[in-house]
Image (cartoon, rainbow, N blue to C red):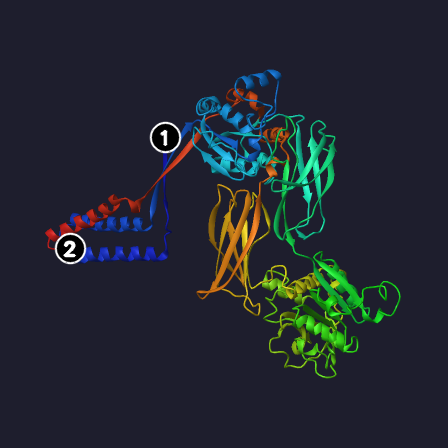
Amino acid sequence: MTPFSASIQFLESISLGLIAATGVLGWFAVRLYRGQITTGRGRVSGLFLLRVLSILLLLVLLLDPVLSLFSERSVPARIAVLLDGSLSMSIPVAADTDEEVAADRDAGEDRDDAGSRPTRASRVFEALGGEGGGLLADLAGRGRVDIYRFGASVVPLPSNPSAEETSPTDDRTDLARALVEGVGARRRETGAVVLLTDGSQNVGIDPREEARRLGVPVYAIGVGQEGTVTDLSIVDVEASGVAYLDNDVPVLTRVRARGDAAGEMVVYLSEGSVPIDSARVDLPGGGTEEEIELRYVPTEEGLHRYRIWTPTLDGEISEGNNEHLFAVRVLKEKIRVLLVAGRPSFDLTFLKRALESDVSLTIDPVVLSLQEFPGTLGRRGIRFPESWAELAPYDLVILLDVGKTSLSDERFSMIARFAQERGGALLVMGSTRSFDLAGTDLEPLLPVAAGPGPRARTGQILPGLTGIGRAHPVTRMEGDPEENIRVWRDLPPLGAAPVFLMNGRPDSRVLVQGVLDGVPRPELPLVVTSGAGRARVLAVAGTPYWRWDLYLWGSGRSGDFFRRFISRAVRWLVSRDELEQVMIRPGKSLFDGAEDIVVEGQVYDDDFRPVEGADVRATVSGPLGSEEEKTRELSLVDLGAGRYRGVVPGLPPGDFRIEGSARVGGVAFGEDRSEMTVAPYRMEFENPVPDLELLREIARESGGRFLPLDEVGELARILDLEPVLDRSVRELPFLENPLFFLALLALLGVEWGFRRRRGLP
């Protein structure tokens, strides 16, 4: 122990006001004693001294003094032991020599059975000394040992951890974070870091850079063997997230074999435990990937979970990457669209391209002006349905630049019946000609009223979202309301738009209106919705709409706005793809086991205006059919603009059911139900080979050393640890010590007692 030192510091500064107050008190003390005391000079001086000491002590206390006592002593250096607790440490160790294999079998460990072979984590636990002795005991003789378990996070462990406390459960490995948090704020007293891991880093920053900045030598203990290992893995699966009943669906799969040639292997596609398809592939080994195609035909609607898998090879290092799950939402059938155009145009070309880019649509285009010409666009092409039986199977009819002279009254009547009786959806698009339907059976169904002889307004007509349009599913292109407004505001202008009467249908809703010379024009509604009996009708007025595609590409921005707008319009019209008033769904159908489960909610009124302040709750039940099945409840947070969000962390693999409800003002507003799947996490098993070279570089960059696990007994001997100075500081605030207040009272009491005895005031 070195002699301690001390210092006093004042937490409050000396202000002019405090100096002035002290001077005034001193002046009054002098005047008091000079004018009133008639006793001897010595007694006057004593009373004056007592008053001055009282004032000075009070002044010192007002400055909030703190006495700091410093001491130093030499103590053993701290050793931070970091144990890898990620799932890659659960991989069985590979067979070593024949003698080791025989020894393990004598001990009851069959290395030919991956499930019974010792794992990397169990080897580390043995090296630590189990629950006593071993490496930890050796290190304790060299310094103060702190033990941590790391993976995605860093957790302190007791000085003698159990096998359960060191078991590998984390779904990722962040070596850099382990180094930083293992040393933490105690860098000065840490003499060494002992890192026991297989080096399988998969998240976080480069640990070599962190080791270089650490300032503490890292002794990296490599777990696992270098060299060739046997491993078969499903590398990737390419499958559409949406499929349709009775359609043949392809699934592309990439398979890889490490080590020696695996020969001919069978790769299976299964739903549950039932194989659907299989393919044989010859895997040459050496990390070469092979691509195969599997196929399935869904026969039921709903969410389906499929599994691509392959049997385990003899001596394979890991089985965790031998399968891959994917989820597919199976729909009843594709949306059938009859696209009827009055004549060829650029708007027709870009509209047809946008529709055909959506794999959920089947498009039948009809160009009326070409019907009398030969070729696939004429007599040999798709013709307008001749009968009600031919029109009824469609889900949506789109009329582009189709005026009252383009079709017969009989066909207009058939389209009106399609909307009113069949409940089919109707989309009317284009210039003034498209809305010149006075006298036809279609006129009463339109959400706008053009009147006799409609006219057009020309100029730079910009689209402007209305209050309803900002939240309506058709025009809500972005989740963020401000971003959605910006997207619409940045669109190029149209050149012309029909002028409509102000008194349209009472149930019509204007989503987008024209803005001319910076002024919104109510007579220029560009996107309008309404209901027509059982169907929905959408009017998209104006031209040319191809600018909303081509012009955006030409200005360096994404040109997919028009495609997404048409896709959303179609889905709203046919009431497909989850455009409902209350939607409480998972963020996606398949979550990885490492992800938090996000539950999203959307609540809208009858006009699809967002409803804020709703009480949105959900239950997440699962894994369905397992012993671990249970129900988790959550309340979704209101994000504004009718959007709600909740998060459920840490769900085990399996299928889950989500049931939710929304209440507004205590009244039930709607319910929803959906399903999802949580897949086992695969990142830790994607590359099961230990990265011992990374550990060598970490040790080299930090000034430490690398040792394989079987040489860990040498670590305590080669550790070069110098004692460190343990500096301690003890602070004693005067205001927290009653002795100073007693001293102040004593000074004032002595003065008061003397004055009392002498009869002084």
Image quadrant where residue 454 sits: bottom right
Q: Which mark is residue 533?
A: none
What crowding class fits label 1: few (fewer than 14 Cα within 10 Å), some (14-19), or many (20 or more)?
few
Label 2 sits on a secondary structure element that is loop
Circle 1 is placed at which residue position?
Answer: 3
Amino acid at circle 1: Pro
* Rendering coords of residue 361 (x, y %): 71, 59
Q: Can you name the residue that lies furthest to the bottom here? A: 452
Label 1 sits on a secondary structure element that is loop
- Vertical relation: 414 (above or below) 484: below
* Rendering coords of residue 189 (x, y %): 46, 32
Residue drawn at 71 percent across, 26 percent down: 260
On the rendered image, what quadrant is the N terminus found in?
top left
- Vertical relation: 398 (above or below) 584: below
Foreground residue among 579 and 533: 533
Q: Which mark is residue 37?
A: 2
- Vertical relation: 38 (above or below) 92: below
* Rendering coords of residue 373 (x, y %): 88, 68
Amino acid at circle 2: Ile
| Residue 404 as seen in the image, left or right of residue 626 | right
